[in-house]
């Protein structure tokens, strides 16, 4: 792990970081590493949990149902997916879409942190508790901190609900929409 981190600091661009992820993470047969996508210097970066089935198949983050909902709410918040850098804490799909294990998060986190440094956004939006706990605080409770700006390492971070968590919950849906609007306003 220490050697990984030392090597990651020496990685100077996203392409090289993606190549490192391709070497380190092993997707299941027929699946791909999902590194993330978006403008190299996006001002807003969104971080989800882990690729799902469609993401692992296509190699792109948030392209399934949760992604379509996210695109819709981004548009309602006056943002375009094309201006946002989107990635996940984990770069490969956990088997059967189970919740990522602590060991998987620990292994993936240095790559995510280097990715954040290289994109160098102004605003981060953490989608769901895996992302919130990985990036902000392992003890954070999503229900307590969502919707409240957090300042950390020079970044303004908006913790919010994961789009998959809002499908059947109107109050969470409104919360996610509101938080994305807040993030959109800060970008302007
Ligand atoms: N859920 C996530 O957290 N990330 C994706 O890319 C898709 C679904």
Image: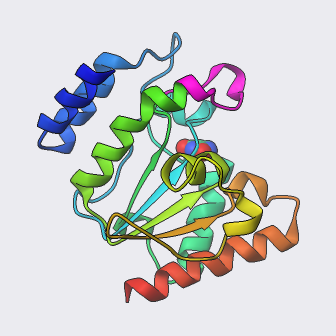
Please tell me which residue is depicted at 59% across the width and 49% down the height of the picture.
133
Task: Residue 23 in the image: state x and y as whole percent.
Answer: 29, 17
Q: Can you say whether 170 is above or below 138 in the image? A: below
Left or right of 30, for residue 146: right
Left or right of 67, for residue 35: left
Q: Which quarter of the rendered image does ligand 1 occupy?
A: top right
Please tell me which residue is depicted at 69% across the width and 61% down the height of the picture.
161
Q: Is residue 98 within the magenta segment? A: yes
Q: Quadrant of the C terminus?
A: bottom left
Q: Can you say whether 125 is above or below 32 in the image? A: below
Instruction: Give the camera-side residue of 78 and 146.
Output: 146
What scheme was used to colour the molecule? rainbow
Q: Residue furthest top?
A: 29
Instruction: Give the camera-side residue of 58 and 91.
Output: 91
Please tell me which residue is depicted at 23% across the width and 20% down the height of the picture.
3
Task: Residue 27 in the image: state x and y as whole percent.
Answer: 48, 17
Please tell me which residue is depicted at 49% across the width and 41% down the height of the picture.
89
Left or right of 60, for residue 96: right
Left or right of 154, for residue 139: right
Instruction: Give the camera-side residue of 115 and 141.
Output: 141
Instruction: Give the camera-side residue of 166 and 102.
Output: 102
Is residue 77 visible in the rendered image? The answer is no
Give, as a single range, the part of the protein colored magenta.
92-103
Q: Is residue 104 within the magenta segment? A: no
Q: Quadrant of residue 159?
A: bottom right
Task: Residue 22 in the image: state x and y as whole percent.
Answer: 31, 22
Q: Quadrant of residue 10?
A: top left
Is residue 23 visible in the rendered image? The answer is yes
Task: Residue 177 in the image: state x and y as whole percent.
Answer: 67, 76
Q: Can you say whether 16 is above or below 144 in the image? A: above
Q: Quadrant of the N terminus?
A: top left
């Amino acid at each position: 792990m220490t050697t990984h981190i030392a090597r990651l600091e020496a990685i100077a661009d996203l392409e090289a970081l993606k190549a490192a992820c391709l070497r380190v993470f092993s997707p299941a047969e027929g699946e791909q590493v999902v590194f993330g996508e978006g403008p190299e210097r996006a001002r807003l970066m969104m971080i989800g949990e882990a690729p799902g089935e469609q993401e692992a198949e296509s190699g792109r983050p948030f392209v399934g149902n949760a992604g379509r909902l996210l695109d819709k709410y981004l548009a309602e918040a006056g943002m375009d997916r094309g201006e946002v850098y989107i990635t996940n804490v984990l770069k490969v799909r956990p088997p059967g879409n189970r919740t990522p294990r602590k060991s998987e998060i620990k292994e993936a986190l240095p790559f995510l942190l280097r990715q954040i440094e290289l994109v160098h956004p102004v605003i981060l939006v953490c989608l769901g508790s895996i992302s919130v706990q990985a990036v902000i605080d392992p003890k954070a409770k999503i229900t307590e901190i969502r919707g409240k700006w957090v300042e950390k390492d020079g970044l303004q971070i908006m913790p919010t609900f994961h789009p998959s968590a809002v499908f059947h919950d109107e109050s969470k849906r409104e919360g996610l929409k509101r938080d994305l609007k807040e993030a959109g306003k800060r970008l302007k």
